[in-house]
Image (spheres, coloured by chain):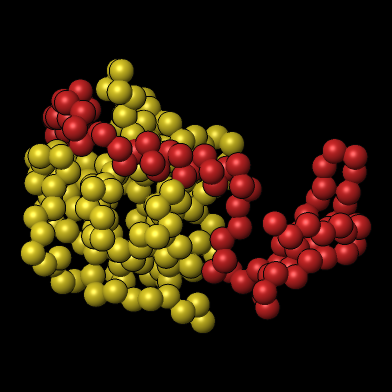
Amino acid sequence: MLILTRKSGESIRIGNEIVVHILENSSNQMKIGISAPREVPVYRNEVYEKIQAENRAASTGASDNTIALEGLRKFSERHSSSGGKS
Amino acid sequence: MNQVAMRDNTAEPEGVTLKYGNIPLQGEKRLNLIHGLPGFEHLSAFVLAELEDYAPFCALVSEDEPEISMLIINLQFLSISNNVRVPGREWDAVVANNKDAREIWAILKTDHQSGEFLANVKAPLIVNTEQGIAKQIILDSEDLVVDYPLSEGLL
């Protein structure tokens, strides 16, 4: 991990197109601005890691889960009986 | 212009009968997930297909690793869809200039104890159906959660 020390008003460049700006710095938090091309996604890391975990949970075991498959059938029947769109 | 790899999403996947568990899939559409899928960043080639006899549920299946598959549902079937606002820059990322070609899907997981289906409306999948380009986005709204119960909001 590259470790740098920056002050408010200073910035860090990553590659050719990404710049991290230190906007405000207080004792327990820092305001950061990120300049990046629109196609580069930027996330709070803890949120991204949560989504990773959710996707992994969604991809495992459900296809073998008979309770889940029975639930599928019930929802599908309810959807059909209510005249739902397909 | 954002250069996004275009895949031929009209051709049927060859030589593989796709299933979700024991449920056959039909109406397969190829999708290119730009940036992969969080948790599976190495996978970008997916198929979106209907579960035979289980409308409105569909499956998202990796073409390269078919064991990676998820249940998904179009947000049009959920009442919370009114609260899901996709920023324009995200539609730009999947080159979805045509509003009629925009779809929003939620990935589902199950509570294995109760069998309850939970939809991830915090991080929906946006799809450009014309070009088969998709992306999972993460929305800022605190009203949106990763475990929205289908029992509360299925239309």
Residue A60, position in %: x, y? 30, 38
Asked if residue B53 shows in the view, the reply is: yes
Residue A85, position in %: x, y? 20, 43
Of residues A32 and A80, the one nearer the viewer is A32
Residue A51, position in %: x, y? 48, 43
The C terminus of chain B lies in quadrant: top left
Q: Is residue A57 left or right of residue B155?
A: right
What residue is shown at x 34% (from left), y 24% (from top)? B111
Q: Dividing the picture into quarters, in which one does residue A38 lie?
A: bottom right
- Colour in which chain A is shown? red
The furthest residue to the front: A1
Q: Is residue B46 left or right of residue B41?
A: left
The furthest residue to the top: B114
What residue is shown at x 24% (from left), y 64% (from top)? B30
Q: Is residue B69 left or right of residue B105?
A: left
Q: Is residue B62 above or below residue B57?
A: below
Q: Is residue B53 left or right of residue B106?
A: left
Residue B132, position in %: x, y? 30, 67
What residue is shown at x 81% (from left), y 50% (from top)? A31
Q: Is residue B102 above or below residue A13?
A: above
- Colour in which chain B is shown? yellow
